[in-house]
Image (cartoon, helix red, strand yellow):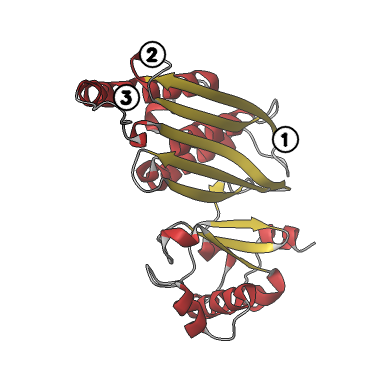
Amino acid sequence: MNKKFTFVGFLVLLLMFTVSSCTKPVGNKGNFTFKQIQVDQQAHLFNNEENPACHIQIDFNYPISEKESGLADSLTTFLLASSLGDKYMNLAPQEAVQHYVKDYITEYQKDLESMYAEDKANQEPGTELGAWYSYTRNVKVEFPFYENNLLSYLISFDEYTGGAHGIYMYEYVNIDLEKRAPILLEDLFVGDYTEELTKLLWEQLMDDEEVNSREELEERGYGSTGDLAPTRNFLLNKEGITFCYNVYEIAPYSMGAIRIKLPFEKISHLLGSSEIIKDLLK
């Protein structure tokens, strides 16, 4: 995932939304339906099925709208840049995915074929070459929540390029379609909320793990690779706010990605009075 673009891209997205809002007001729900592009492709080194291969899967979902095509197109551009990279952002979705898959395969073969040929030539009888020559990559864009003026999307990415294990990550973004902007924590909470919200996150994690103290959580590995604090990586829906911490952010790789869901009733005293929150609490 192109993390650099994700941050800078918010400004681009805001600009595109501002331009479209001058002429096309958005209705409550944005009038979106969603299209899906799926690719599942494998390619072998030297195009020989007896050799190791790379395997790439793409599941790219994106919004379309007859009444709000400008807004849908802006969102799709941002989704392409965030999930595939800014190199593909100005292409039509189907074309972008096709180019992305082709580039991935080309790069895999270019990077590994010479090394594999050398290892193959020096291979001793009865031995096998390292499994690290087999690569995988999976990219998925989906919409876990869409109601009224709130559209939430999730980009999932995982990749294996040899070694002990692969890497994977999840990125949530929530968009206020009325304001045509991503929703930040500052849009939801009021006052100096960080310390209290951090305390609630620890308490919820204790409940989830069925322990009685923060020390017990720390003994299990929580907080060992980074501080537990409110993150911008969260999902907003009718159940509350779910904060997502990717591998290594607050715990070792072996513990996986960690999600902590805070129901609205536990954080109501910290929330502001945004229209998004009002709609979710109806």
Q: Provide the secondary structure element on which disc 1 rests.
A: loop
Query: Which is more toward the observer, 53 or 77?
Result: 53
Position of residue 201 measured from the top left corner of the image (x, y, whole percent): 55, 74
Q: Earlier in the sequence, mark 1 or mark 3?
A: 1
CA–CA distance in space, label 2 to label 3 = 14 Å
Residue at position x 26%, y 25% from top? Answer: 116
Position of residue 281 measured from the top left corner of the image (x, y, whole percent): 76, 64
Q: Provide the secondary structure element on which disc 2 rests.
A: helix
Inspect the image, locate mark 1, and give the three-letter code of the amino acid beneath it: Asn
Residue at position x 58%, y 79% from top? Answer: 203
Inspect the image, locate mark 3, and give the three-letter code of the amino acid beneath it: Glu
- Tell me the mark number nearer the camera, choosing from 1 and 3: 3
Placement of 49 over or under 235, stated as above or below: above
- Tell me the mark number nearer the camera, choosing from 2 and 3: 2
CA–CA distance in space, label 1 to label 2 = 45 Å
Position of residue 166 measured from the top left corner of the image (x, y, whole percent): 41, 45
- The residue beneath circle 3 is 107
Which label belongs to residue 31?
1
Inspect the image, locate mark 2, and give the three-letter code of the amino acid beneath it: Asn
Which label belongs to residue 281?
none
Q: Earlier in the sequence, mark 2 or mark 3?
A: 2
Left or right, 120 with reference to 134 = left
Is there any visible trace of residue 19 in the rendered image? no
Q: Earlier in the sequence, mark 1 or mark 2?
A: 1
User: Badge 3: how crowded within 10 Å, few (<14), some, or many (20+)?
Assistant: few
Left or right, 23 with reference to 249 = right
Q: Residue furthest right?
A: 282
- The residue beneath circle 2 is 47
Left or right, 16 with reference to 63 = left
Residue at position x 49%, y 31% from top? Answer: 77
Q: Residue furthest front?
A: 126
Position of residue 147 measured from the top left corner of the image (x, y, whole percent): 73, 48
